[in-house]
Structures are given as structure tokens and as C-alpha cells.
Amino acid sequence: MRKTFLAVLCLLLPLASVAAESGYNVKYDGGSVTNVKAGNDVKLFIEGNQIRIVRDKADVATIPASSVTEISYGQDVHRRVGTAVAVAVFSFGIGALTALSKSKKHFIGLTWANGDAKGGFAMQCDKNDYRGILAGLEGVTGKKAVDSDALNVKN
């Protein structure tokens, strides 16, 4: 009896923690959401008919899925120069190798128009989450995400 109880408890405990922690941790990068500053950590919830932005357990914005007009995504790639300099202080060879490595940041933008209320925001997503966020937003809104890197005009 005791082993059965422990087995059931071992199975239910991870499920309870996953159920309590739904949503995505993202960094607000800017936009028309008034109660949040750029760089703040927020939580994004993609629900059946709406998208919610939550900060400190309080809803900051609720966007009806039907009002979303565009979903965009892009990447910011840069070299790790600061890290390379710091590492080069201790080991020049490893510092030089670090300077050759690149870092990517993944951004997703969302715009909406709900009657006269129009807005948009950009968020920085974790490299492990951005595909899931894009798929969730596309599924809820019915809009296809646009690659903003492909839209840049190069002279």
C-alpha cells in the first residue's frame, strides 16, 4: 500500500507543477502596453480566445485573439565581444575563440486593432520557447507569422 501511494505521488507531483506553471516567461521589449517598461519580465498566456500579458500576478493587457492583425518575428545576432574581453584577461586563446562565437536573441511582435483601440508590442523570447509561442499565436489568431528579417530592404 505504501509503495503504491509513493508511486502515485511521484506521478502526480510533476503534473501538478506543470499545471500550475502554464504560460511563457518573456521580456517586454516595447510597445503600447502602458503599465510595463521595456526590459521588464512578464508572463505571456495564450488562451483559447485571448492573449494575456501578466506582470507580478496582475493582468497588464488582455488582447482578443480575433483583433490581432499581425504577428512578426526576427532575430538579433551579435558577437560576444564583452565576454571575449573578460575571458581574454585570464586566457588570451580562449578569449579569442569566444570572440568568434555569436549570440542570438529572438523577438516576436504582435499588433492588434479592436475597434478604436489599436496597439502593439514586441517581446524577447527564450531560444527554447519562441517556436512554441509562434505556433500558439498562429493557432489562436489564425494569422501566419511574418519573418521581419526577410522584409528588410537592403541597398
Image (cartoon, grey):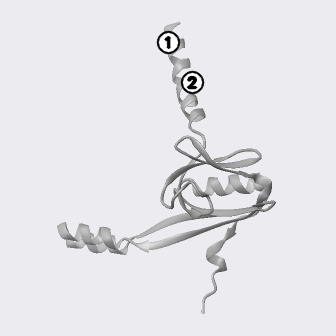
Q: Is residue 111 visible?
A: no
What residue is at 53 percent from the left and 13 percent from the top?
Answer: 5
Q: Which amino acid does label 2 sit on?
A: Leu
Q: Quarter-wise, where is residue 112 in the image?
A: bottom right
Q: Foreground mark, 1 or 2?
A: 2
Of 34 and 92, nearer the camera is: 34
Please tell me which residue is depicted at 73% across the width and 57% down the height of the picture.
Answer: 138
Say whether residue 86 is visible: yes
Q: In this view, does 141 lie above or below 14?
A: below
For the residues labelled 1 and 2, the Cα–Cα distance comes to: 14 Å
Q: Which of 150 and 107 is in front in this view?
A: 107
Label 1: element kind? helix
Q: For mark 1, what is the residue?
A: 3
Residue 118 in picture, x, y percent from top left: 73, 63
Q: Which of pointers 1 and 2 lies earlier in the amino acid sequence?
A: 1
**Which residue sits at x=19%, y=69%?**
89
Of 12 and 117, nearer the camera is 117
Residue position for label 2: 12
Q: Where is residue 7 in the image (x, y as percent from the top left)?
A: 53, 18
Give the residue type that dot 1 points to.
Lys
